[in-house]
Amino acid sequence: MTALLLPALPIAVGMVLIVAGFFPGRRLDRVAPGLAVTAALGTLVLAVAAAWTRPSARFPLFGGLPAGLAVDGSSAALVVTVAAVSLAVLVFAAGEFAAGEARARFFGLMLVFTGAMLVTVTATGLAVLLMGWEVMGAMSYALIGFWWRDPGRVRAAGVSFLTTRAGDLGLYLAAGAALAGTGSLELSALAGADEPWRDLVAAGVVLASLGKSAQLPFSFWLSRAMAGPSPVSALLHSATMVAAGAYLLLRLQPLLHATGWAAPLVAWSGALTALLLGAVALAQRDLKQLLAASTCAQIGFMVLAAGTGTVAGGAAHLVAHAAVKSLLFLCAGAWLTALGTKALDELHGAARRYRLVGVTFAVGALALAGVPPLSLWATKGAVLAAARDTPALYVVGLAAGLLSAGYAARALVAVWRPADAATRDDTERQGTRRVRSQAPLPVLAVAAATLGALVLPPLAGPWRRLLGDTTATGPNATELTVSGALALAVLALTWFSARCSGTVRAPFALHWFRLEQVAVLLVARPVWALACALARFDDRVIDGGVRAAAAGGRLASAFAARRIEPGIDGLVNATGGTARRLGALARRPQTGQVHLYYAQAAVLFAVLVLIVLVAG
Amino acid sequence: MTVLSLTIFLPLAAALGLCAAPRLGDRAAGWAWIAACAADLALTVALWIGHGNGTGVSHETNLRWIPSVRAGYHVGVDGLSLPLLALTALLFLACAVCSLGRAKRARAFAALFLALQTVCLGLFAALDLLLFFVFFDLSIVGMYFVIAGWGHGDRTRSALKFFLYTFLGSLVLLLGFIGLYLGAEPHTFDMAELIRTPPLSGSPGTAALVLLAVGIGLAVKTPAVPFHTWLPPAHTDAPAAGSAILAGVLLKMGPYGLVRIAMPMLPDAWRRYAWLVIVIGVAGVLYGALVAFAQENLKRLVAYTSVNHMGYVVLALGAAGAGGEEAARRLAVTGAVTQLVSHGLVTGALFLLAGVLYDRTGAYDMGRFGGIAGVAPVFSGLLTAAAFASLGLPGLSGFIAEFQIFTGVIGSGGGGTAVAGALAVAGVLITTALFLRLLQRTLLGPPGELTPRMTDMRRPELAAVAPLLVSSLVIGIAPRFLLDTIEPVSAAVVRLVDR
């Protein structure tokens, strides 16, 4: 029961709020934040209870195929994370919106989104998983395009939804292949699917996960997703949405390894995304864009973990990153609301003006940088430890770690250095000069600082057992020391270089390697051109054929009417005329005078006699 | 008179009643129409409850009609016809509610629609080929008068094109039916007998020709590519209620005929030409979606998405004959039937909403709108919901249908069907793109040229559209009540095709 109630609670409350948000008067706007926070709190209570009792629910869905929701070890970790982050974000968002804004719609969408993520992480089969997965995508569309009057934001929402849905097609394929290969849609059966269906399932799952998690080459949608309100970024790009892809790969890690090719592929895409998007983050001049790129990069570490098989390390990185990144996005959102800007140089001194935000941001940024003893230092160590066997992978991962220290340090320096000539307010919108609902920030900061303990003794053992990870080797002390020292060195270097020079100039990386333009050029434009060409073809050729057939019919009838019909009619008329003339001729002898009839009879009789004589 | 016959002929009786009461005002005629439709919907629900989830045909009546050719008034319902009967009754009720106080010459309009409702219900209940054909043809006649009498724009031309094109199709269908009649020993038009002993099982060449005739006749009505070009003008110039019925009910007659007649009566030929059916289905999916993507006119766009959605149905029915895992093919057929219901609900809602737009602004050009969400929030919410239902968002009925079709087609285990399924999946992405474009250009962004003329939904319009979308939501969240009814039939159809 709890398994069903857990996602049903936020979805039901969210639906009510969304529907109410469309009706005139929008009477629920005033109470929407309170209602949503209460629902999120209830969801968190349910999530903790579910993590403790491990409920499961089975129900028939399609044909004889069973479907269900269950909270097992790895989903227990996720449901609590999702519910907690969502509560924190909603509490923060309660203070974010002005009185006139459609708050009922916003909070409703956020709740349905949270519920969909809970469905995704507790689903036991591909059908139910796909349902949560796609609803999450659609809600992200509505949330990114929340300020719908701005065509740029609407376009951004469309790009995000279309890109992730392009990846989602992989899950449809995987579901079909799973049915062919295993006779069911259960996630636990996928690794044992028959060949070649297992390869297809793996390919579909990898495609969908890379799309959802904004890994290369799909990363660009995350940049566009920043057009949404800051609480949206804080929820979508920390514990949910992008995390769903990584979670699915971690959960289906046996499948990836069973195929032989999928695991290394996934490991390398994760590692390369971590490295290249780290470089993108380093080149950004906008705080939210920097955080977005860093999200891609950090998710890359989780994907790398799925590829190398360290479920415990990857999951710990996921949980810790959720806390870190939701904290950082909320801080960025707080400054954006208060100061009206998110450009890095215009934010100079922002941390000093709003101290609590500044301090909590610093904790998050230091954790992101991998500074010991904060969370991501340890979890990243655990992920890299599993990549030791492939030195190239390890080196790429390590370099990506250094980059994360670099971009985290840049953000930290930008907001903490004193206000200077570059500092500007209200360049993007009118700031409110106050930060409301700061309560979630310290809580998230504590989580961001301490969650690394999950991969360190004494918690490492129970954590691994929770996730059913038997193979993982923990990070050793040397590696942790070296990575910590390197992070600190990069931090110091960035600190000093930022004081001297300023921005990093790398236009290619600044524009996310122009991935979106490439996608538009290679996919969107050709499809649009094809659509237009086919529409013309449909009009001219196919319907033209129908019109031509009709016109042919009309022509034939005109021809028949003008040429054939007069001929036939003429023939009929001629026959009639001939008959008439013959009649007239026959009427000639009918004079009515008896003597003439006698004469005619006499002539006829003479002819008859003649014939008889001649013939006789 | 059985309950089923009462259900079928109640609307006709109401129509005659309306004709017999010339003094009746427009308002009263509208309410009488709604009352008749509501009573009929209640009757279909009663039929459904009475039928339960059984496999066979229930509520059967078989009366002598034209004994010389062994054609009878044979009607009955099973898991295939019941959802479509309920859909028909619901959509006609929605049209009645939506037209309240809006239709010109309301009494005649109501009478025409009620007569058309009898025709549609009769078709889905018919168990005799000749009876089926009579209803099939009468539906064309009824819709012709709806478009020609109450349409707008170039309505006479569109109505004529619709009539001639689909009537030609129905003549080909009649040839096919005659072929089936002659092929049966003894000659009969009775569907139950024709299904029990498939005609022409000994002569594959003739069977192929008969399947070709039946297939073309039904493909025109479905419509399957390339027989679809009558659809966009008919929709564009039809009144909103007419479009909703045309897309929601009349199009269903094609695929319904494939499942009811072509597949079980010509199983050998269906299996032999399954690949052709699959190709036509995939072509419909991709071609329909792409052409819809490029449309500027809202109604033409929705019309082409119908081609796309019916393509999924044709693909699934083709895959059912292509061999492979039986459970997967059952899933595909169940998905196809679910798609018929889902498409009826969602596209019906989309056309009624397009009618609201036209009622206020007199235009369908998307480029002249924008930012409607600001002036008509309820309309925008409903259109968004309908668009997401149509693009197959989980939680709404379209996903339930399409997921089963994709999984069933790919899961049947053949390499070719897997490729066909994969190609069809791509149609989902194009549909997404075109609906996002639709929302972006009409509802969102800055206000357009015609936006100030737009006003929000009136009560009757809301009362007409909301139940359709709520039904879609119910099927999307708790589909078992529908699937429990359909699944026995899809199992039977797959078994019959495999004979």
Image (spheres, coloured by chain):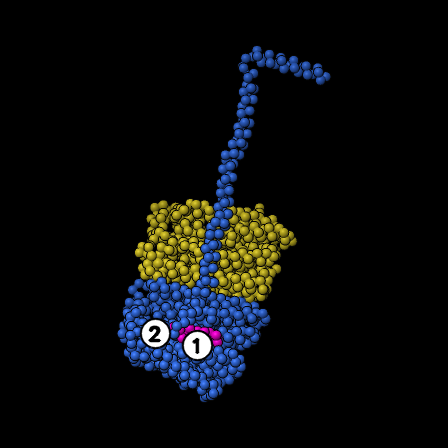
Of B106 and A527, the residue lying toward us: A527
Q: Chain in blue?
A: A
Query: Dot 2: what SS?
Result: loop
In the rendered image of this protein, does residue B318 appear above or below residue A507?
above
Classify residue B86 by image quadrant.
Answer: bottom left
Q: Which of the two residues, A332 or B310, is positioned nearer the viewer here?
A: A332
Callout 1: SS? helix
Residue placed under numbered mark 2 in the picture: A344
Q: Name the residue beneath numbered marker 1.
A: A298
Viewer-side label of 2, 1: 2
Around disc 2, counting alpha carbons within 10 Å, would you say few (fewer than 14), some (14 to 19), or many (20 or more)? many
- Looking at the image, is B167 positioned above or below residue B426? above
- The prevailing secondary structure element of the residues shown in magenta is helix
For mark 1, name the chain.
Answer: A
Whether residue B13 appears in this view of the structure is: no
- Judged from this view, the residue extending furthest toward the left is A433
Picture quadrant of residue A581: top right
The boundaries of the magenta stretch are A270-284
- Which of the chains bears the disc numbered 2? A
The yellow-tinted chain is: B
CB under 8 Å between discs 2 and 1: no
Which amino acid lies under the numbered mark 2 shown in the image of this protein? Answer: Leu
What's the residue type where badge 1 is placed?
Gln
Is residue A257 magenta-colored?
Answer: no
Q: Position of residue A1 (x, y in %)?
A: 44, 75
